[in-house]
Image: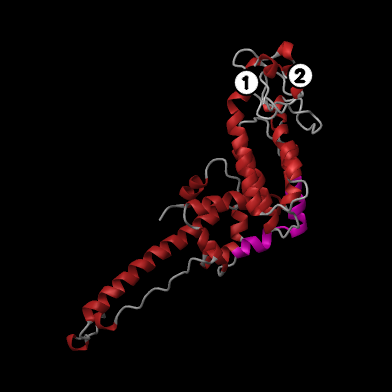
Amino acid sequence: MLSLGDFERALGKDFVKLIGPENYEEWFTDFFDIAYINGYRDFYLGTEPILEKPERPYFITERATHSEAPANWQYLLAVYKIQLRDWKDNNENARSACALLRAAVEPWIWNELSSDDTTSPQNAWKAIVATHCPPDDVRVARLLRKLDIIKLDDATALRPFLAQFEEVYNAIQRANGTFTRNMLFPMIHKALPRQYNTFIKLWNLTHSNVYIDDKLFKKYRSLLLEHADRNKAHWQAAEERGAPWGNDSANRSNDRITSDRPMCDYCGNFGHYMDDCRYLGRPDTPRCSFCNKLGHEEDICRKKQQG
């Protein structure tokens, strides 16, 4: 059996113990992740049963005689040994789950629990949550404030950014908050840097009045990650050049990028990427029916005249 100090080290040096309702939400998320990784979460939820110690068969007691042993005593003894081994493993895991929970809270919180509460990890968990979980309206208000301050500073670090939003969203649902995916999207878009303006505009054009369920959110997440992966190298190169985002001069013929001549996926012209396209969000822009590029009509198409 590991000591309490061993479990405190297992939590990690950056883990913050539960001190009360003021840090309950952050503590809950961090601790449940650790409990899941270590295989103890089901003990707190009550989905992992606590086994009773099996009774020793009567025929192997000190007072039993040879004549009292049943004909199938070998089979019954083998079953007892299996049950005893399972109970020992289960009991050890349950005690470890209690020790991990004890290490995750301040000592005074654990000392407030009754002896009945500490008999099982589920009882201890229920007692701690009942005492230190703030009211739902308070939890939702705190979580909404947390959503409002999330920002993505590094355009290439999208995955942990989305995971953070999803984590807070799920916490709001646990707190019985009436917060939908449609309400979440504007907050995500507000927190994204300018490199994602193209994606946001295109998404809003095609999904402005659509109800967003979990299935559509997964599609949105996949498309957003695909957009980031596709443009990652370009963004990093632009950062190295020190090029400002949203510079319209990148679209002008006298100031186009000449090193690799990128092609815009939106208008079809060379010299800029889709994120910098000046035609984005302008549905009245003419499209040439000959070369299929935006910005001119077929009768003045240079490619047609040269061909």
Along the horizontal axis of the image, is 299 left or right of 270? Answer: right
Amino acid under disc 2: Ile
Q: Secondary structure at mark 1?
A: loop
Q: Secondary structure at mark 2?
A: helix
Amino acid under disc 1: Pro
How crowded pointer 2 is (Cα within 10 Å; few <14, some 14-19, many 20+) is rated as few
Q: Is residue 128 above or below residue 182?
A: below
**What residue is at 41 percent from the left and 65 percent from the top?**
90
Along the horizontal axis of the image, is 260 left or right of 245? Answer: left
Where does label 1 land, which residue?
A: 262
What span is colored magenta in the figure? 126-146
Q: Is residue 235 above or below residue 281?
A: above
- Does the image show residue 18? no
Give the percent coordinates (x, y) of residue 169.
Answer: 68, 50
**What residue is at 80 percent from the left and 31 percent from the top?**
282
> Is label 2 or label 1 in front?
2
Q: Is residue 73 magenta?
A: no
